[in-house]
Image (cartoon, grey):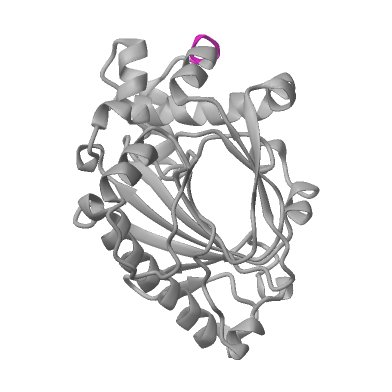
């Protein structure tokens, strides 16, 4: 983990190169003093009942203004305003902290996460249980090796931390599980897309990442005894990671803002550190 002294979302620092290098190595960037202040009105949104019962979180796509998961239409505009403001703050942060990524990042989405971790941990299948160590992979949205970068901020009004576990190096992880993964079927990939299970055909890379996600979560011994470190992110702090690289698990906490971007592998400073290139090196195959 690399700890950074940021206190303002637009703050200028000379951390760019070291921050990017740490991020691409699979480290979490921790900004313990970077809070995101909510107005009195926005504080009223911190209610789990605001989230549609069919959804885990409230989601927002800032480029087209699409907001989903809000049950109370009278609070939709305020929710959209909050998530748009968070998006703009994250853009400012990226331009200062990760300037080399600025022109390459795309497909922004963000979320307001109002439920306590225990609520969805106790009511979901093991595949969707994010209190189990995992790397992010999207079952219905193949991304062909593009990186998933996420910015999180703990906005808990009761000073409750967000508790995570963070696991081993991705290369070690891949070596551990690759021999156990099912083989890739282009026909199955075509069929899943044809019937609407996926938005486009899964690449060999997407297949491996999804298999890796599931193998990790189903491996109880790994969950208990695998290499891991517990981290508490206090209220009023933020953190950043490539969520497709370091194994991570949310163990406790409530009330989080989250911003996601996608980054092409060739937009990285060192593409060889991407999961795509690591998996291609280990399998000795082109995976996309």
Residue 180 lies in the magenta-colored region: yes
Q: Quadrant of residue 85?
A: bottom left
Q: Residue at x 38, y 24 (%)?
A: 187
x and y percentages locating residue 100 in the rendered image: 21, 50
Side of 90 relative to 159 (left or right) = left
Residue 137 lies in the magenta-colored region: no
Q: Residue at x 64, y 82 (%)?
A: 43
For the C terminus, the image quarter is top left
How many numbered discs sit on the rendered protein?
0
Side of 230 relative to 108 (left or right) = right
x and y percentages locating residue 138 in the rendered image: 47, 42
Segment colored magenta: 178-182
Of residue 197 and residue 176, the one placed in the foreground of this image is: 176
Q: Quadrant of residue 283?
A: top left
Above-or-below relation of 72 to 216: below
x and y percentages locating residue 124 in the rendered image: 73, 46
Of residue 272 and residue 56, the one placed in the foreground of this image is: 272
Above-or-below relation of 275 to 149: above
Of residue 38 and residue 211, the one placed in the foreground of this image is: 38
Above-or-below relation of 97 to 246: below
x and y percentages locating residue 136 in the rendered image: 50, 40
Dominant SS type (magenta) = helix
Q: Residue at x 43, y 34 (%)?
A: 26
């Amino acid at each position: 983990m690399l700890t950074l002294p940021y206190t303002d979302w637009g703050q200028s620092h000379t951390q760019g190169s070291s921050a990017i290098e740490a991020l691409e190595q699979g480290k979490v960037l921790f900004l313990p003093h970077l809070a995101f202040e909510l107005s009195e009105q926005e504080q009223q949104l911190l209610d789990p009942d605001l989230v549609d019962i069919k959804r885990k979180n409230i989601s927002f796509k800032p480029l087209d203004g699409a907001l989903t998961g809000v049950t109370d239409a009278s609070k939709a505009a305020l929710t959209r305003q909050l998530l748009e403001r968070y998006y703009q703050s994250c853009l400012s942060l990226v331009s200062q902290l990760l300037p080399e990524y600025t022109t390459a990042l795309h497909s922004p989405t963000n979320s307001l996460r109002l439920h306590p971790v225990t609520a969805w941990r106790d009511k979901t299948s093991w595949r969707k249980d994010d209190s189990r160590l995992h790397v992010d992979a999207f079952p219905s949205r193949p991304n062909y090796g593009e990186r998933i970068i996420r910015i999180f901020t703990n906005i808990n009004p009761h000073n409750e931390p967000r508790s995570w576990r963070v696991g081993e190096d991705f290369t070690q992880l891949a070596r551990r599980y690759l021999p156990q993964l099912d083989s890739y079927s282009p026909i199955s990939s075509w069929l899943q897309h044809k019937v609407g299970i996926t938005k486009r055909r899964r690449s060999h890379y997407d297949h491996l990442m999804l298999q890796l996600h599931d193998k990790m979560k189903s491996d109880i011994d790994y969950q208990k005894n695998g290499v891991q470190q517990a981290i508490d992110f206090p209220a009023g702090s933020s953190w950043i990671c490539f969520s497709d690289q370091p194994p991570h698990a949310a163990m406790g906490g409530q009330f989080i803002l989250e911003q996601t971007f996608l980054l092409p592998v060739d937009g990285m400073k060192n593409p060889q550190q991407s999961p795509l290139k690591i998996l291609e090196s280990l399998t000795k195959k082109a995976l996309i």
